[in-house]
Structures are given as C-alpha cells and as structure tokens.
Amino acid sequence: MARSVTTGHKAIATAGAWIVALLIFFPILYTIITSFKSETEAIAGFDLIPSFTTESYAEVQSQYNYFKPFLNSVLLSVGSTVIALAIAIPAAWSMAFSPTRRTKDILMWMLSTKMMPAVAVLFPMYIIFRDLGLLDSRIGLMIMLTMINLPIVVWMLYTYFREIPGEILEAARMDGASLWNEIVYVLTPMAVPGIASTMLLNIILAWNEAFWTIRLTTTDAAPLTAFISSFSSPQGLFWAKLSAASTLAIAPILIMGWFSQKQLVRGLTFGAVK
Amino acid sequence: MATRQTRGLARLMLAPSVIFLFVWMIVPLAITLWFSFQQYNPLNPINDRFVWFANYVIFYSNPAFFAAILNTLVLVASVLAITVIGGILLALLLDQPMWGQGIVRILVISPFFVMPPVAALVWKNMILHPGYGVTADIARFFGLQPIDWFANYPLFSIIMIVAWQWLPFATLILLTSLQSLDGEQKEAAEMDGAGFLSRFWYLTLPHLSRGITVVILIQTIFLLAVYAEILVTTNGGPGFASTNLPFLVYQKASLEFRIGQASAGGIIAVILANIVAFFLMRAVGKNLDK
C-alpha cells in the first residue's frame, strides 16, 4: 500500500466508527439486556446491568406458549424457501445456459411481479384463501411466502449460474455426458455455494415478512411476526417479557444475517451491486 | 450449441416459474380491478352494484385519502433522505482502516435483520415511551419534560423507526460499492493534490451513483408498502396523522368492509409502485446487457 496510514488517523476512525455502530446497535443491545431483567427492574429507569434472571424467558413460554409461533416461523421460512428453490433452480438453470431472445424480458417481468404492492390484492387473496380453506393454515402461508420470494430466488440463482463458465459444460458434453449427468456431476457441485446463499437470504426474508403473515393468520399458523404484533396493545407483554420474546424472535436470523452480508447485497440489488 | 431437445427441455424447466407467477399476479389483480368498480360490502349486501368510477371519486374526495397519499410521500422521501445521506457518510467512515472493522460492520448491519413488528415495538416501548423509554430517562436526567413521541409526532416517530431499519441496508450497499472503487485512481488523485472534498465530489460520488440509484429504487418499493410498523405503534392515528396508503386500504377493507373503495385504493397503490418500478427496471436492465 502506497499510502501510509498514521496510527492517529486509524485511532480516530476506530473511535468514530465504534461510537456510531454502538448507537445504531443500541436498541437491539438494550432489548437483550432488558430480557434478563425482572419486570420491576425493566421499568425502574435506565440501567445497562441486568440481574441476569431468565424468568421472563420462562414466562413467555409458560404464559404464551412461545414455542408454537417459533416453530411456525421455522417451518414457514424453511418450507417456503425449499419449495421456491425446487421451482426456481430449473428455471434459472435454463435461462443461464439456454438463453433465448426472450430471457431478458422474462427476468424483467419476474422482477416486476415483486413490485406489486401486497395491499392491492389483500381482499382477493383473502377470499381466495377463505374459499380454498387456507386461512390460518401453514400450507397456505407457505405457498404465499414461496410466491412472493420466487422472483428473488430465480434472480439470485440466475446471477450465480451465469458465472459458471459454459465451456465446462461443453467439455462435459464432448466427453459424452448426458444432460442428467451434466446436471448432477458438473453443474451441481459448482452451483452449491450459490444455492446455499440464495437459501440463506430467502429464509431471512420469509422469517421477517410482516404483511401476509399477520393478515392471513389468527392462531394455528401464526408465526413470530403475528405473535409479536399481538402484543402491541397496552395489556400485552410487559417490558422484560416483550424483550425476551423479541430477543428469541430475532436471534436466529441476526446470526444468519451476519454470515450472509455479501449475498444480501447481491440478492437484494438483483445482481446490480456485487 | 444447444440441440433442439435441450432447448425444449429448457423451456419446460422455465414453465412452472412463469406460469405460477403469472397466475399468482394476474388473478388477484383482476379481482381487485373488478371490485374497484363495484359497491360491495359483505356486511350490507343490499346496495351492492356496479358503480363505474364512483369508488375512485369517493376515494379522491375523502380527506383521508389525501392525508394518506401525503403521509406516504413524506415517509418515503424522509426515510430516503436520511438513509442515503447517512449511508454515504457511514460507508465512508467504515471504509477507513480501523481496529475491529468486522465487528463494527456486524453491529451496523444488524437492525436490517430485525423483523418489523419487533423493531417497532422495541422503539415504541423501550426507546420512545414517555414514561419508561430511554429518551424519557435522558430527558429527565437533564431536567426536561419527556416527549410523548407517538402522540405528538406520530409520523416522525415512524420515520425514525423505518429509517433505523433501512440505514444498514443503504450503508451495506454503498460500502460494497465503495470498496470496488479502483485504489490506483484514488492514489493518483491524491498525488495530484486533490483534497478530500474534491476527491469525494469528482471521484467517489460519481462511482457511487449506481449504488445510490439502486438503494433509492429498492427502498422506495419497500417504503411504499410500510405496514407492520404503523399497525403496532400508532394504528394510523391520531386521526389520520400516520396513515399511509397501504394502511388506509387495509382499514377500508378489513375494518370498514368497504371493499370497492379499498380496491380503488389498491389500484392507486399499484400505479404508484409501477412508476417506481419502471425506473428500477431500467437501472437493473442496463446491468443485464453487460
């Protein structure tokens, strides 16, 4: 590196960045701290040191059966992502390796479906779900989450697949590999990292989806988004319990998110920024 | 290179995605369009009939509609301004050499992964609550009267929450974009004696323009649809002070059962989103040709 960085410069940048980062992170940090307080402590004024009680966590489970919405969130986000991958992998494969004149138009059209505001189809979706008996059902919501994330899944996979050099496939074909062998032995190993990243990002998006998961569920299929929203009224959870429920709701996704920063940029910008 | 057989197979592999998405989009949208020309109330079906454009007219003459459109635009514009300017500054800061850069990045990106209802309730209760929130504690420490944010500044409070959620996104995209800036160019500019400001203005900012465009367009899509944050904090109030277009449509459909008016509002929302989508597609489409 030609430019020498003075220690003073580095120290100032470090101090500035840490102060800003801690300010931004503070609401999350304070929620985690409060979750380890008792209810009386939680409203006793600003205090960064809790008594490290886990009573709020126990009460969230015993009073509100927390495990059920948590399980629903896991099933819905993982389930919808797996279904979306199953539909999207062939589509992305075909567009990346056998592009036609229309490929670009199809990709753009898929992207445009993602931009339809959910609220515009609230009532039609409601009556369709009602008539099919899918209201408050995990299957119904899984289909919904699959469909709203399908465009992003196709797009992400497409941008990953496109980076696999076509010559390798041609070489395999020359060696007499059948299409099936080509997919299983040549393409799949090279595609696994891209598929894994796509999966990770879409589990995050499905976990945090907060329109349909709230509007199309009541109790049986309600995931954490709907569960937490039901505590918006004043009679709801108290501070410590709200914090415990919130900490549990965001922890798994926060950790997954930290590992997927790069993929996040790529997936959410539809490959426009890498 | 592809034989006819593989081409046919390729089409077959593409078909499910295209068909599912097409049906998924077109059927509900057609139903909404149909209902937007009807007077339809499932609780009081006696007056149900075809009313042409009456729903659109009612929606326009309803003061709530104007409030909702205005609130939607204020929300989108404010959050964009905060996140883009804040995101550029943060990206520049995080791009500096420092100790613990990895952890700083993780702390800054975290709010983006917090589900909207949790983000909104944490801010409502732990940070902004006039009795027990941290801002109230700080105000009392300085001997001031704590502010009841959601009662006095409802839209501003929601803007704060939503900006907190999206600032990490803008920062992350712009930081990624910043790191792809050619180091040699930067050094050359430095050697030529270009100061920090002129380097930023003539080199960094033009380089970031693509990232900024993408941030603005993608955020606009999501910001036009803000819903859960309003539902769990102000519920649109007081009055219509924090009702945006999606929330108004939800109220008309799910609470007042005025399906016709709600559908007309939904169609307006589609048109708004499509105007943005048009520009986003052009920005993304350019990238495809490369």
Image (cartoon, coloured by chain):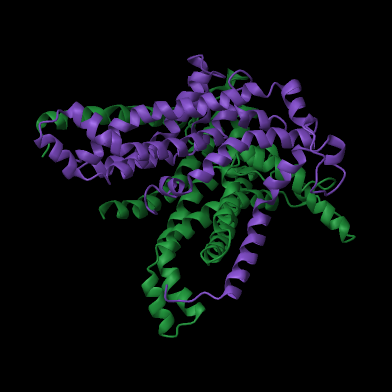
Chain colours: A purple, B green
x 50%, y 55%: residue? B172
**Relative to B201, residue B140 above or below:** above
Quadrant housing residue B113:
top right
Q: Residue furthest right?
A: B143
Of the pair A71 and A268, the residue shown nearer to us: A71
Quarter of the N terminus of chain B within the rendering: top left
A227, A68: nearer the viewer: A68
- Is A50 or B151 nearer to us in this picture? A50
Q: Quadrant of the C terminus of chain B?
A: bottom left
Count of numbered circles in the view: 0
Residue B38 placed where, x, y %?
Answer: 50, 28
> Can you give x and y, in whole percent of width and height, for residue B16 in the image?
30, 26
Horizontal side of B21 relative to B233 (left or right) equals left
Q: Can see residue A190?
A: yes
Nearer to us in this view, B266 or A255 = A255
Say which residue appears at 37% left-offset and 36% top-offset. A195
Residue A239, located in which quarter of the rendered image? top right
**A144 lies above or below B246:** above
Residue at 65% x, 49% y is B161
On the image, the x and y values in percent for residue A58 come to: 75, 26
Q: Position of residue A193 (x, y in %)?
A: 36, 40
